[in-house]
Image (spheres, grey):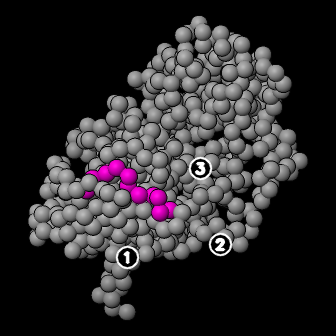
Amino acid sequence: MSNRLIAGLLAATAALSAAGIIPQPNQMKKMDGSLELKPDATIVFADTDARQAAEVLAEYLRPATGFKLPVKAGAQGSVVLQTVKVSSLGAEGYTLTVDQKSAKISAQSSAGLFYGVQSLRQLLPIEIFSAKKTTGPWIIPCLEIHDSPRFVWRGMHLDVGRHFFAAKDIKKFIDLLAMHKLNTFHWHLSEDQGWRIEIKKYPKLTSIGGYRASTPPYGNRNGSDGQRYGGFYTQDQIREIVSYAAARHITIVPEIDMPGHMAAAIAAYPEFGNSDIPNYNPEVVTRWGVFPYILAPTEKTLQFVDDVLGEICDLFPSKYIHIGGDEAPKDQWKKSKAAQQVMQRENLQNEHELQSYFIQRVEKMLTKRGRLLVGWDEIREGGLSPQATVMSWRGVRGGIDSAKEGHDVVMAPNTYLYLDYYQNNSKDELAKGIEFECIGGYLPITKVYEFDPVLPGTLTPEEQKHVLGVQAQIWTEYIKTWPKAEYAAFPRGAALAEVAWTQPERKDFSDFAERLAPLRKAYTIMGVNAYDGELPLPPKAKKGSRVTTSMEAYGDHPAVCAFDGRSNTFFWSNRAPNPDDHLTISFDAQLPTAQRVTVTTGGEGKQAGDILVNGVLEISADGKEWQTLVDFKEGKATGTAAAGTESIRLRCTGEQNTWLIVKEITLE
């Protein structure tokens, strides 16, 4: 075989491996040639701040290559890492330059260097992910990358309350988050079905609250397997995991859910519940769902909460502490004389205001410890503290409203980011076995990928600054084992990573799918039980256009279906539109001539009423200033978009009770 042919094959291998960088870098220029790492390769740190990232890189590369890869101080080597003062990179950005002599990673911070290391790792052949020595050659394509993340909060949530996972599994999860440049691990540590963290002052939280009498088996949601189940993390384990995550530039945000979802804690310490109500008999819950046991809003209970949060803050250095606040039934408060007395004392009008009072008291406990409160969007009910951060899970409306009011938000909507939903047709999944049961819903990777956390056209540029980022959730009612958790998380977690890191104009699902192919092989090499089914074809808007909306889609009816050139598809919202909700078509270039626009809303049969009741059809030349063409009448609108139009939108102008279907929008 000629040297020229060998060089060509090596270059082809390098080009293939380069397709696997996820999340997509925001600037990348490929160049001719490649760099080969050989047995005498060295890894060099140009300054002490770069040493840790250099050592991490060596640890990543040694098992598969079998090379010694010494790490030393200096300015020249096979791979050089250095910290630099380049403000344009931001706190987590990096540059990666590879030529035929060496690779160089530069960043302002150790976090940026770490992310540069992740990109370099993905540029190598996928065998680099093996834990055992494999054959090379170890080729890296020549290129230049200038990269930084879109959002500061790039998160994944894991519920260990319903099902408990070993510390080694949590560490593996952290490694996978780091590989995808995610930087936040939201650890859901308490639930009705189990309390999972040792609290020294209250040992019964784990000895009693950490165990339940039985669990529903797959396929029988109201059944019981009759087997005692539980477990918890010791404080030493917590400290070790927190340190492990910090070394990988991941912040662990702990969640102690309150005042609801507290049945396990109340079973351990009944005096902290509403013990003055009839038939009071708390126990660790053995079913899934929402249950009535809620913490009492008394001083005794609030002291308990303060004590618990004190130990939580000692264990977790995170700036944010998550206190839940979701799904808190108020029935026990309505029946409790003690709770009603608190309402009278504090001049509260209803139990929603009582929850707000409770949350505000908890926030003061965090504030005195220098921490910030974050909670699910129910913390808005009854009034929201100015400093509170909202995690929007019931769709995006709670996040939109909070950002408009000046609150920081994390977008975590169930409609796009609940990874415990089916990622394939439920019949096909269940045909594999009853253990493939999910809670319900349908969330293919294409829908995760299409989510835009700032909801273009909904929030102003100033309001968008309050969107800290994005987070996916893994609830574990129907995830009993660690392999199934991995199955739920990946490769949808790769789509999440690109949503969180990559600028929208750099995103394209077809390109993502090409880069995902080698990464899915890497999952297998790493022993990750990722979902291995075929990727669905993503819906696409007509060429040269982009469709956005402030409304979430119902089922497999995304916004692009309103302008995809197909008469048998449509957009269907999963709720009634609110005033100023919109669906917008933006063109890559302004319309060269005037065109007639026709919009028909409403479905067939039972869905015929899903029309736009109150709305207008509008056009814009710049996406900022809008001109009304015509009002909607009986769900229809027709008008003429002038030459020079860049965007067309339908906008809701009044309240309505029905959902919305938008059929194919036509231009003639």
Q: Give me the residue at 14% from left, 56% from top.
A: 621
Identified by mark 1, the residue type is: Arg
Q: Which amino acid, mark 2?
A: Asp
Residue 40 visible in this rendered orientation of the protein: no
Q: Considering depth in this image, is 453 or 36 the residue closer to the camera?
A: 453
Q: In what quadrant of the picture does the N terminus appear? A: bottom left
Q: Nearer the viewer, mark 1 or mark 3?
A: 1
Residue under circle 2?
A: 428
Instruction: Looking at the image, tell me whether mark 1 or mark 3 is earlier in sequence order.
Output: 3
Task: Examine the rendering and report whether any part of residue 485 can be seen.
Answer: yes
Residue 416's disc is none
C-alpha separation, residue under disc 1 versus residue under disc 2 = 27 Å
Query: Which region shows up in magenta?
Result: 607-617
* Residue sticking out furthest to the front: 634
Name the outermost residue toward the bottom. Answer: 1
* Residue shown at 38% from the left, 67% from the top: 663
Q: Which residue is mark 1?
A: 566
Residue visible at 45% across and 58% down in the picture: 610
Which amino acid lies under the numbered mark 3 shown in the image of this protein?
Ile
Outermost residue toward the top? Answer: 345
| Residue indicated by mark 3 | 474
Q: Is residue 128 left or right of residue 567?
A: right
Q: Which label sits in the foreground, 3 or 2?
A: 2
**From the image, which quarter does the C terminus lie in?**
bottom left
